[in-house]
Image (cartoon, rainbow, N blue to C red):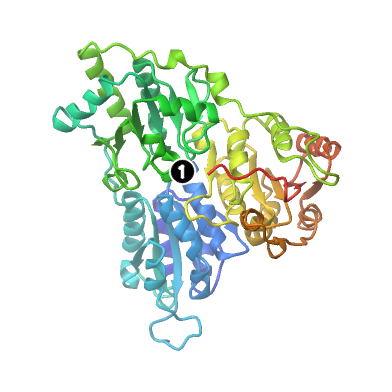
Amino acid sequence: MYVYQSIAQSLADHGLDTMFGLMGDANLFIVDHFVRDGGATFVPVAYEGSAVLMALAHGRVAGKVGLATVTHGPALTNCVTALTEATRAHVPMVLLAGDTAVSNPHNLQNIDQRETVKVTGAGFEQMRSPETASYDVAHAIYRAQVEKRPIVLNMPVDFMWQEIEHTKHVFQAFNAPSYVPAGDDMDEAIGMIASAKRPIILAGIGAKDAVPQIKALADRLEAPLATTLKAKGMFNGHPHNIDIFGTLSTPAAYDAIGKADCIVAFGTSLHQFTTDKGALMKGKRVVQINNTVTEVAKNYHPDASLIADAGLTADNIVWWLDEAEIPGSGFSTELDIDALTAHPEGDPDKTTPGFVNFEYALDRLEAALPKDRFLTTDGGRFMTEVWCRISCPNAESFIATTNFGSIGLGMQVAIGAGYAVPNRPVVLFTGDGGFMMGGINEFNTAVRMKQDLIVIVANDSAYGAEHIQFLDRKMDPGLSMFDWPSFAQVGTALGGHGIVVESNEDLEDAIKAIETRDKPLLIELRLDPNDVPRMRM
């Protein structure tokens, strides 16, 4: 077969059946064979970086290696922000990137693609020859799994029509879970946990597969449970769940965390927003459990650390507590969880004509949006209020595009996640700036691909984070403000259904539109730029 056929067959050999991308002269034949002869799904995007973000979300939610493809030169440079986001999210994915022919160094689109990829932190894998094509594909997929980051497979365009014998290569990624046996590290950690009077169990998304074991440990210790932002929803329904830990906690929960004397953290790197730049860890023993050594002490140096699987370690800690007959702390029984997790209700009358109160709108949407939703958020000053007021069924039903601090990534992630949960609605909250930067490019992709997508645009007609800085310094915020087009009309023009909300009555009409939707729905919330809640950071 030809090399392009061997590449597509190699993807099928690995059970990969969904690819996001934009075709060009270096990858179009791969895509064609992948779809027509492999019976797979190809999602054509409007902008190359979108393919990476969709693959990131699809891989993360589906629990497999994400797959994207672009051609060479500017197609790859358009992926730099997306690759950086994916790298920092530690999501295994492969980007099949075409490259110009070595024999044609004067090609207008020729660049050093290895150096371009290196700045993002992603891995680079060079397709070495036509004969090694299937091996190189398999090795890129293997690396993505064990390195937990994107791997860019660089494919010279002049290989594609060369004839070869296809050989199936699939390399097993060895990742057996482990725990720390008896020894000094375990003794130190157990000693801190056993002597704690007011312990709290904290979990990040790295512990998503250990929820039952972590709950059992919390019950044994009589300790409240909390999560990082990325693990939002992980302990839904548990009677001692105090929700998000850190700057997104309610004031009451923040005070309760302050009274704790020990934090047992699973699957989190203890980001500065989680620890409030270390303030929430003062006066406490911190025990960090993570299966990746580079994540330990990455943001905060713990008092004890175990490099191990979260579930096995939680079980191990319970065993040692039972063996030593350590009584429960009783800390969780002292707390009024309802009071600790309640956010003040939004006031429908606290607004000016032509706008809707954001907190009130979020409270109404929380009640009205489909309960089985998958939730994702773009970047912007609106997002912290969304994280606090809009729930998700569990931690695996939520992605926040927060890893690189970029706006304009949410729509792409929402579409990618939709392919991993095809029978569930996806809800995206984005800002006006983020929608104009990335959402408007791909909303029509959701329409074309018939996605069940609900997009809520928080439109304050400004770059909000900059707007508030001007106001705080008593400066004119005019340069941060924009006279955008009607996003509701844009959504309709792109093939969806758009509805604008400028009053409480409009909000009820939008809620009815949620119930009767039959295509991607865009709800534009018009917000007073001077009355948007401050970011909780």
Quarter placement of the N terminus: bottom left
How far across and down, in percent of the image, does residue 123 sit? Answer: 35, 61
Q: Position of residue 223 (x, y in %)?
A: 39, 20
State the residue in front, 372 or 392: 392
| Foreground residue among 297 and 238 | 297
Q: Position of residue 227 (x, y in %)?
A: 45, 33
At 43% from the left and 87% from the top, the residue drawn is 104
- Please give left or right for residue 222 compared with residue 243 in the image: left
Dot 1: within a 10 Å radius of its alpha carbon, few (fewer than 14), some, or many (20 or more) residues?
A: some
The image position of residue 523, as x and y in percent, is 75, 45
Which residue, as the protein is rendered here, is positioned at the far left?
183
Q: Residue at x 69, y 45 (%)?
A: 532
Name which quarter of the figure residue 159 lies in.
bottom left
Residue 39 visible in this rendered orientation of the protein: no
Q: Which residue is mark 1?
A: 273
Would you place residue 406 above or below residue 354 in this image? Answer: below
Instruction: Name the kind of residue labelled 1 in the image.
Output: Phe
| Residue 157 placement, left or right of 522 | left
Viewer-proximal residue, 124 or 17?
Answer: 124
> To which quarter of the image does residue 473 belong?
bottom right
Give the image quarter of residue 426: top right
Whether residue 330 is visible here, answered yes or no, is: yes
Name the foreground residue: 449 vs 460: 460
Instruction: Please tell me whether mark 1 sits on a helix, a strand or a loop.
Output: helix
